[in-house]
Image: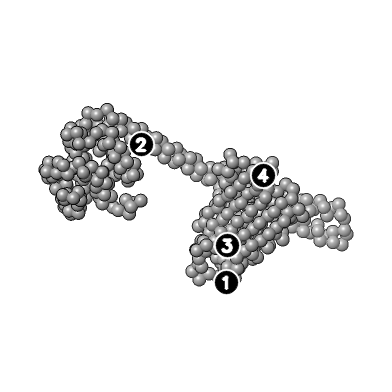
Amino acid sequence: ESLRELDDIDACLKIYRRILYPFIGEILKVKTEFREKLSEYYVTQGIEITDFGEISINDVKGRLMKLPESQRLSHTIEAFNSVLSWVYERLLKEGMIDVEDLLRKLRLVLRLNKDKAVELGVYPSLLGRLATKIPQREIHKVYSDYLEELVEEKTRELKKAHENLLKSQRLAAIGEVAAMVGHDLRNPLQAIVYSLHLAKRELESSPNSSLTETIRMIEEQVEYMNKIVSDLQYYARPIKPNIVITDLKEIIGEILSTIRIPEKIEVSIDIEDSFKAFPTDPILMKRVLTNLIMNAIQAIKDKGQLRITAYTKENDAFISVQDTGIGIPEENLSKIFQPFFTTKAKGQGLGLTVCKRIIETLQGSITLNSKVGKGTTFTIKLPFKNPDQPQRSQPPLIKQSSRS
């Protein structure tokens, strides 16, 4: 971690100091020859080693600054690797260290500094030099093991990059589909909603229970179709939050007032008073909580409990939706936020994906804890800091679908 904050030269010098340090006791026994070896290279002439085993590389950076910038790193690696290979070869030859001890120390240092050293090209050069200059089978094995590990790591990186590319391509395709669906379905859906509104007004003067029930069923299906379109668009298009001071308890109250909760489900709400002035986007937050609450209700097959809590810790807000429902099988936990993953007979598998995307857009995270037969808890973590000059009023909350 400490290497990330350094420039390439400083990081390189620190790595080599770490590589030398485990062998300092043995190096002191050949200190005179070691100093002579250091003096052979312009870069390492600036290294000082005391009788107590302290290594000073302060002057090295100054010497490097006199070289062209493009040559500084390569000269450093070449000089230090030459010195190190001489050290290891000499220590083994004199019997001051055995191969197993050398490799144990070397592996430890290589592992601790691996990422930055690979990035700078330190290790490939060092291990390649050791494998050719020191005729020990074990050192050749360290080099081959390193190469194998490096290939595996690069393969994983390529695989991840390929997966990200496929995801980006899929996202772009969904965006095109969402735009088409939004254009082709939004207007007809609005026409249906308006027609239903007129029909309901007619029924006020001429009541017909059968027709009223039919209209209610049509409204539910239109609402569900609207949610499909909205989920696609939320998944595909950029989300731009509008952060305002919001009363979280009011949002939850409005959600619960617009959805049907079975009588056998007991609902409890525990919201800290600090959430009366919660900086967030109320429309986005309502969409997320609606999805989570509906999922919780659907997970409770008979009687059970739905618990919604919110508390603060330091500069973070934690909002949880907990149910005592059927729970989520362990094999599905890693897939639950993936787009189009669903175990429901009716659903597109975008509800939780949209929730995750919204929360991440709000600079937060969402996690879950679930046990089959016991229930599930979704926990949202968000920063709880006052935004710069927030609006004191809350815009009208757009009613969201209660289906997920």
Residue visible at 30% across and 30% down in the picture: 141
Q: Earlier in the sequence, mark 3 or mark 1?
A: 3
What residue is shown at x 39% (from left), y 38% (from top)? Answer: 153
The numbered mark at residue 311 is: 3
Q: Is residue 306 left or right of residue 36?
A: right
In the drawing, what numbered circle is on residue 373? 4
* Residues at circles 2 and 4 in contact by the CB criterion of under 8 Å: no
> How far across and how far down the image is residue 228, in percent?
65, 49
Q: Position of residue 213 (x, y in %)?
A: 82, 52
Q: According to the image, label 1 marks what residue?
A: 392
* Residue 149 in the figure: left or right of residue 278: left
Residue carrying label 2:
150
User: Which residue type does callout 2 highlight?
Assistant: Leu
Q: Would you place residue 195 above or below residue 136 in this image?
A: below
Query: Could you tell me how far apart the alpha carbons at marks 1 and 4 are, in whole angstroms?
Result: 43 Å
Please rate how many residues cluster around mark 3, counting C-alpha atoms within 10 Å: few if below 14, some from 14 to 19, many from 20: some
Q: Amino acid at mark 3?
A: Tyr
- CB under 8 Å between callouts 2 and 1? no
Assign a secondary structure to mark 3.
Answer: strand
